[in-house]
Amino acid sequence: MALELTPIDRGLVLVISGPSGVGKSTLIAHLRGEVPDLGFSISSTTRAPRPGERDGVDYHFVDEARWAADAASGAFLEHARVYDHGYGTPRAPVEEAVAAGRSVLLDIDAQGAAQVRHTLPEARHVMIVPPDLETLRARLLSRGTESEATVARRMALAREQLEAAPAYDYVIVNGNLAAAEAQLVGVVLAERARPARQGRVLDRLLGAADR
Ligand code: ADP
Ligand code: 5GP
């Protein structure tokens, strides 16, 4: 059940990256079950849906022409080609969330995260890493959604993601699932506790103290 938390007055934009198959979707699903009011940015992608994925829920599944037009018109907050497909974060929902003080999660690759560091400097960045590369390969295979060739390609590109880890605010090793889940929840709870997000409560307390 979700924790009962005092609302914050400035939303958190949390970027979550990591090699394919490391467990990002699994950890994000758990996080959203624990912490209330965490929106998820639904990316556009040119890749085909996996079994069980729903258009408009997991991704907006679009064709190359649509993706290129959105990239050219500035409709994406960031965009990148990953594993030969186009991916992009629609700008408007993230900007609306920030303006309204709501928190939002972005599951994007390291190229996209680097763009967000420039366009949205207040965002926080978490990199999820596997305990070792054999575990990563086993998870990609166990998911059963990728061909052998796709798994090999994703393994080859895992290194590019991992090399970007020092630029992130947090690195979480997803070995034991319960431990990684707890760490990710911990990051969000710690970020919520920053004084910059607690203005209303502090104003109320200080106002009361003045009387
Ligand atoms: P990503 O979103 O990073 O591509 P997924 O969340 O789809 O990765 O996870 C890939 C596979 O690994 C899934 O089958 C998932 O159930 C499994 N998995 C995720 N985290 C762990 C973990 N800590 N231990 C064992 N299996 C895991
Ligand atoms: P998948 O195809 O396995 O869902 O995602 C492949 C990779 O693309 C992952 O590293 C994921 O984080 C990244 N990704 C998903 N959406 C976006 C996006 O909107 N922008 C960028 N830059 N990467 C994304």
Image (spheres, rainbow, N blue to C red):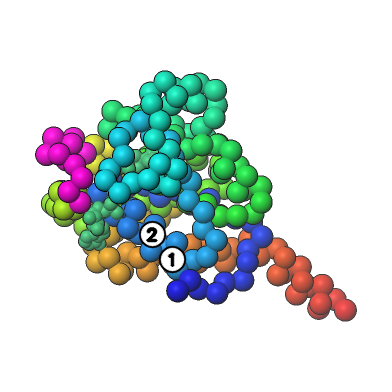
Count how many numbered circles sit on residues in the image. 2
- Which quadrant of the frame does ligand 1 lie within? bottom left
Of the pair 166 and 194, the residue shown nearer to us: 194
Q: Residue at x 55, y 61 (%)?
A: 37
Residue beneath label 2, please?
Answer: 29
Amino acid residing under circle 1: Gly
Q: Residue at x 32, y 33 (%)?
A: 47
Q: Residue at x 88, y 79 (%)?
A: 211
How many other residues sit within 10 Å of disc 2, few (<14), some (14-19) or many (≥20)? few
The secondary element bearing badge 2 is classed as helix
Q: Is mark 2 within 8 Å of ligand 1?
A: yes
- Against 114, is 193 above or below? below
Mostly what secondary structure, the magenta segment?
Answer: helix
| 31 and 173: which is toward the camera | 31
- The spot of residue 76 in percent (x, y) is 51, 32
Classify mark 1: residues with Cα within 10 Å, few (<14), some (14-19) or many (20+): some
- Quadrant of the image containing the N terminus: bottom left
Residue occupied by mark 1: 33
Magenta segment includes 153 = yes
Q: Which residues are magenta?
A: 143-155
Task: Answer whether residue 165 is visible to the viewer in this image.
Answer: no
CB within 8 Å, label 1 to label 2: yes
Residue 158 occupies quadrant: top left
Name the spot of residue 150 as percent of width and height, x first.
Answer: 18, 36
